[in-house]
Image (cartoon, grey):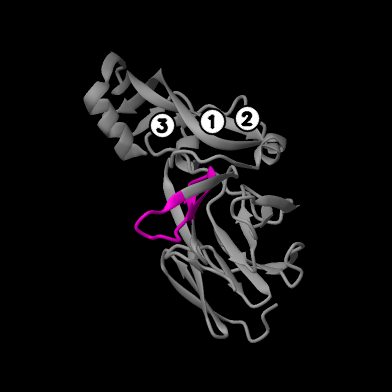
Amino acid sequence: MKAKLLTLFVALATVIGCSDDGVRTVTADVTIAVPITMSIVEVRESVAVESIRQLSESGKFYAYQNFILVNDVNKGIHVIDNTYPSQPVKVAFINIPGNVDMAVKDNVLYADSWLDLYVFDFSDPLNITLINRLEEVLPQRRLPFPEEAYDGDFSNFDYERDIIVDWEFRTEEREFTYSDNGDQSAGNDASAAEAGGSGTGGSLARFNIVGEYLYTVQQDQIHTFNISELNSPVKLGEEYVGWNIETIFSDGSYLYIGSADGMYIYSIDNPA
């Protein structure tokens, strides 16, 4: 934060006053991030199979039979008929706010939302239907605080009821003080700026199906679901793995879980 402020002061600062003890006050324009929110109820009510739409931000790819599922980051899943690879055809869009991953087994599609797990009948990809929702079985993902923002305005954000789905920005003038010895302090607390068959998944898959079990990784945990009853997954538990978990793969009786700083190997001789 000090490095950010130094750059800010050099580029933009205007000296208002300087006291005898060498403390200076300056003003500068800073970027404030304001969360755009949806209530949890609104998120759940908006999940639906819709007509095709333009891809916004490509995320994970998943191949199943003659179809490719493409995640539109935090928006949902594009369903593409790849029967003729030279002429792939979009056939549907599954609107799922907060979706980043998916997996399919025996024509049943599993997809995450911000904190829920959704189950769809994929037996007819031209007529996909929602058949189940497991509420709050995943830890709620949160959008990272924008790096370009100095501070955030959360005055209208209800932590219990709302989910942040995007950010908007405004510019504010703030006062800062610093002394000749190089120490700076902001007129307002800046701490918020610091906080701030089954198919085949792609290289950053967070879902993995092995036999009758679905494994998902989220942030720092692995979650295990029994999917022997395909339409009614049962969460068996979760286990802390490590920080910044990014991906999961399986081979035989092992799970390989990739993180930002290494790989963890888990035995699934007992898959539960």
Question: Residue at coordinates 38% horizontally, 60% vertically from top-left?
Answer: 85
Measure the alpha-carbon separation of dots 1 and 3.
14 Å
172, above or below 90, in the image: above
Badge nearest the viewer, 3 or 2: 2
Q: Is residue 66 rendered magenta in the image?
A: no
Q: Amino acid at mark 2?
A: Phe
Question: Residue at coordinates 62% horizontally, 30% vertically from top-left?
Answer: 157
Question: Residue at coordinates 26% horizontally, 21% vertically from top-left?
Answer: 12
* Location of residue 151 in the rendering, given as x and y in whole percent from the top left corner: 46, 30
Mark 3 and mark 2 in contact? Answer it, CB < 8 Å.
no
* Location of residue 161 in the rendering, given as x and y in whole percent from the top left corner: 71, 35
Badge nearest the viewer, 1 or 3: 1
Q: Which mark is residue 157?
A: 2
Q: Please rate how many residues cluster around mark 1, counting C-alpha atoms within 10 Å: few if below 14, some from 14 to 19, many from 20.
A: many
Mark 2 and mark 1 in contact? Answer it, CB < 8 Å.
yes
Say if residue 191 shows up in the picture: no
* Horizontal relation, residue 130 to residue 69: left or right: right
Residue on which the image places disc 1:
35
Q: Secondary structure at mark 3?
A: loop
Q: Amino acid at mark 1?
A: Pro
Q: Which residues are magenta?
A: 69-89
Residue on which the image places disc 3:
150
Q: Amino acid at mark 3?
A: Tyr
Q: Nearer the viewer, residue 57 or 3?
A: 57
